[in-house]
Image: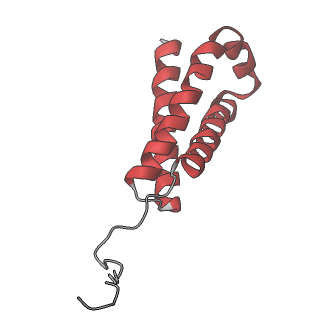
Amino acid sequence: MRNSSNYFISLADSRATPEETAWSLPGAVIGFLSWLLALGMPFLIYGLNTLFFFLYTWPFFLALMPLSVIIGIAMHSLLHGRLILSSLATLLLVSLMFGVLLMWLLV
């Protein structure tokens, strides 16, 4: 036997996928900001009378906040971290949710 050591040199695989990044924080911020913007839309449409409407219906709109955050995380993840696209998609979906709830409560 030879008096030597066996060395195994491994090069990084170029086909390996990069590590997953965390999508939750930017998506959650986008979802929360979209919720705040959507919450302000009835004030633009109906004015200060919206405060009387919110007096009894605020739990419905508050219940949409965690859902908006989850939608923001999901859109940011599904769109691979594209900030502008995920912001627009989240804002559109959250505004649609608020519109549907508002129309349901006004009927």
| Residue 53 coordinates in the image, percent (x, y) | 67, 14
The quarter of the picture where the N terminus appears is bottom left
In this rendering, would 87 be left or right of 36? left
Front in this rendered view, residue 71 or 53: 71
Front in this rendered view, residue 88 or 31: 31
| Residue 28 coordinates in the image, percent (x, y) | 58, 43
Number of marks: 0
How is this picture coloured? secondary structure
Residue 66 quadrant: top right
Q: Residue at x 59, y 42 (%)?
A: 34
Front in this rendered view, residue 20 or 54: 20
Residue 39 quadrant: top right
Q: Residue furthest front?
A: 1
| Residue 46 coordinates in the image, percent (x, y) | 66, 27
Front in this rendered view, residue 35 or 50: 35
| Residue 38 coordinates in the image, percent (x, y) | 60, 36
Q: Residue at x 57, y 20 (%)?
A: 63
- Whether 41 is drawn above or below 16: the answer is above
Q: Residue furthest left?
A: 1
Q: Residue at x 69, y 31 (%)?
A: 43
Q: Residue at x 31, y 77 (%)?
A: 13
- Whether 47 is drawn above or below 81: the answer is above
- Whether 107 is drawn above or below 83: the answer is above
In this rendering, would 49 be left or right of 12? right
